[in-house]
Amino acid sequence: MKRFFIKLALFTISLICVYGFLVNKLSEDYVDIYYKKFTQKASGLIIGISKASKGINPAIIEKKLEELNYDSPIINFALNVNNSPFGEVYFEAIKKKLNPKQNNQLFIIAVSPGAFAAPQNMSPEDIYKMDKKRTILGKVNQVAANPNYNYILNTYEQPLYNALHPYEKWTFDEIHDNGWLEIVPVSKKDTISEIDTKFWKSNILRLFSDQLGFQEVSSYRIDSFTKILAYLKSRGDAFIVHIPEDQEFYELENKFWPTFEKDMDSISNQQNIPFLNYSNRIGHFKTYDGLHFDSTGATEFTKMLSEDIYNYLEKD
Amino acid sequence: MLFNSFEFLIFLPVIVIGFYLIRHRYRWVWLLAGSYFFYSFHKPELLILLLISTVTDYFCGLKMVGASHKQKKAYLTLSLVVNIGMLFVFKYLAFFTNSVYELFGFFGVEITPEENFGTYSFSNIMLPVGISFYTFQTLSYTIDIYRGQIKPEKHFGIFALYVAFFPQLVAGPIERASRLIPQLKENVKVNLPNIKKGMVLIAWGLLLKVVVADRLGIYVDKAFANPESPHGFSLILGAVFFMFQIYFDFSAYTSIAIGTAQTIGVELMQNFNRPMFALTVADFWKRWHISLMQWLRDYLFFPLGGSRGTKAQTVRNIFILFFIVGLWHGASWTFVIWGLLNALLLVLEYATAPTRKKVFIAIGLRKRTIELMGWTFGISYILITLVFFRATSLDNAITYINHMFQFKSLHVNILENYFELVLSCILILLVQTIHYFKGNDKIYELVIGKPKHIRWSFYIAYIFIIALFAINRQNTFIYFQF
């Protein structure tokens, strides 16, 4: 019996060691498109959903606002509509993510109706539980560690052999250390064609339309959003931003929440936080699927955004 | 609690070690508490239904002793009403009400649930995990007592353990009281070879689940999410992968269940006997989900008359049997159609058997050739019927099958990852080869009793396979939903 237990212990320890080695190896290279958003403390944040994740490059903002002496680094901590909708889970993660000792931070809060959506008739407690269970932010306890084993253990769903050879990721995306998810339409291996763009656009429109059909604007998410705004304002300067998209998506969002811009304006006034609404810039910036900016679109948009923020602060 | 979870890795050794440390007369308490803990781990409220079923059948079973035929019938009816009533409410009510609404709608009468029940909809009713399994298990107990085949169990704790025995509570095998209760009473001594066999079965089941079934599931999910795909071959491969996914997934669960029970000296029945090597559809159903099919044979098919009546009666009985098989699996028309399609081929096999035999003899086909033809046809038919099992609606199933045969492109790599595709195919072949030689029940012979160097090679290979190739997603077992 004693020998049996020794063998069993040896087997278990060996399994844990091999597993640990692979997890460690994985953490040294590419994990997934969000991993790098979870590997450092932030002294400024960009929050929102995928439009913000792909559309705002913190490096451009830092450079433009250099003379205003904001704390750095600013991290793009926006994920996507399924993983970072406004709510207490996102709020908790933001609090953990921020460097506690600094109070001259810059925050860009990107808003779109999808970030306030929740299944119809769901109670706030259930929405919280759902966010906790299903979102990356809910699963991960450690949001600023490098290497972030907690992130890998709780969210990584691929086989670990990926740690031993270069991961066959989507060739068009590149996650930067500052959390910006850059979409490069022409990569070394491939190019995003017009057919791809059309297919993605129709697909994403269908998905959006389906999803919004059984969802509603959640007062719980709006409440959390205002709490997040109040908290961020106490840590520095905050800006609410509405990133533009193609006309079809704009119409779909308007259908879902017809008074969205008016309501955001009203929250912005209540909280005394500027609302930079770019919905009049539909079609100005290059998207790869009608909704998300590619590298060029994101760079142009971020330049314009940082210019506007700079002008606002100068005027102030 | 899931077998493929970290919690179970802690739970199992605690239960097994505790079981052998506790004196025999108190072991049922330990196992019953463990079983209730296991079942209610995520949703404690699930215990209520299990307890209602347990108390009802314990009471009905005892009351049938020495009762008149009329009274016995009344107690059996009570047991049937309570158990099937709960199953109906929690599993089928939404399906039946929606079907009625649709029927009215077909005749132009629009009724919506809101008009009749305010804002409440039956679709909100939660399906308790494993209800179909434990309902059938407890029903067999009262029916067997009614038939005089077994005596009721007087010890409430042992009976409650029979209903809730954690290794097979959630997804079977559906055990009979005559087999399981005596084993639960037995004073089991520590038997290291038995424990080792159990552990090998558990390890095999885990590997089958997290390395093979879950891997196939990724391709299957993608294929079935796009039934209108122009890539016919990818849809065919999706259907093939689903056939193996559901088999490996359920077989994995059964292996872990049998292995777990074996570690505490309980031998559960086998649920599979190499079904993918079945030569006909009838043969397939003798090898697939054996405990359910035997249950339905004994408590439904035979009482209906089985195949002892006229041909027409046999055909009717087969259709009723497979209508229930379909409905047992899920409250949806897709499952009903799946069941009925299987019945259809069984009836055709049954009706054409003499003619086919004559034709094969006349054209001089060899036995091997006939078997190969039977296997190819049978497995292809099962594969197509399983599209109904997996599809989310009848429309999707029909679209899927329709597009399977539109060969507009040769594209099969819908995951954009050739390595995973090739790996999936290799794993299917590997597991099927092992099943061919060792069956579903003798997997431990690969390791147990082999020389030391072979055993340790297996252990090391196992560690690396699990660590490198497991899909790190905690997927529930497919049969949990039934």
Image (cartoon, rainbow, N blue to C red):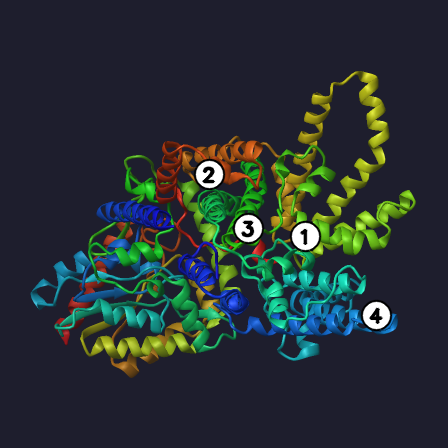
Q: Residues within 10 Å of mark 3 (few under 14, many from 20)?
A: many
Instruction: Say which amino acid is labelled 4.
Output: Lys
Q: Which callout, 1 or 3, points to the residue nearer the camera? A: 3
The numbered mark at residue B297 is none
Instruction: Say which amino acid is labelled 3.
Output: Ile
Q: CA distance from mark 3 to mark 4?
A: 35 Å
Instruction: Say which amino acid is labelled 2.
Output: Ile
B254 left or right of B454? right
Q: Farthest residue to the right: give it.
A: B310
Between B119 and B221, the one nearer to me in the picture:
B221
Q: CA distance from mark 4 to mark 1?
A: 35 Å
Instruction: Determine which residue is flagged by label 2.
Output: B448
Check disc 1 and report its element: helix, strand or loop. Answer: helix
**Mark 3 touches mark 4? (CB < 8 Å):** no
Instruction: Determine which residue is flagged by label 3.
Output: B258
Check disc 2 and report its element: helix, strand or loop. Answer: loop
Q: CA distance from mark 2 to mark 4?
A: 50 Å
Q: Which callout, 3 or 2, points to the residue nearer the camera? A: 2
Q: Residue at x 75, y 50 (%)?
A: B322
Q: Sequence order check: which comes first, mark 4 or mark 1? A: 4
Instruction: Determine which residue is flagged by label 1.
Output: B334
Q: Give the position of the C terminus of chain A as an image quadrant.
A: bottom left
* Parent chain of label 1: B
Q: CA distance from mark 1 to mark 2?
A: 43 Å
Q: CA distance from mark 1 to mark 3?
A: 30 Å
The numbered mark at residue B73 is 4
User: Would you say residue A301 is visible in this rendering?
Assistant: no
Q: Residue at x 29, y 44 (%)?
A: A18
Q: For residue A130, what is the image quadrant?
A: bottom left
Q: Residues within 10 Å of mark 1 (few under 14, many from 20)?
A: many
A12 left or right of B139? left
Q: Sequence order check: which comes first, mark 1 or mark 3? A: 3
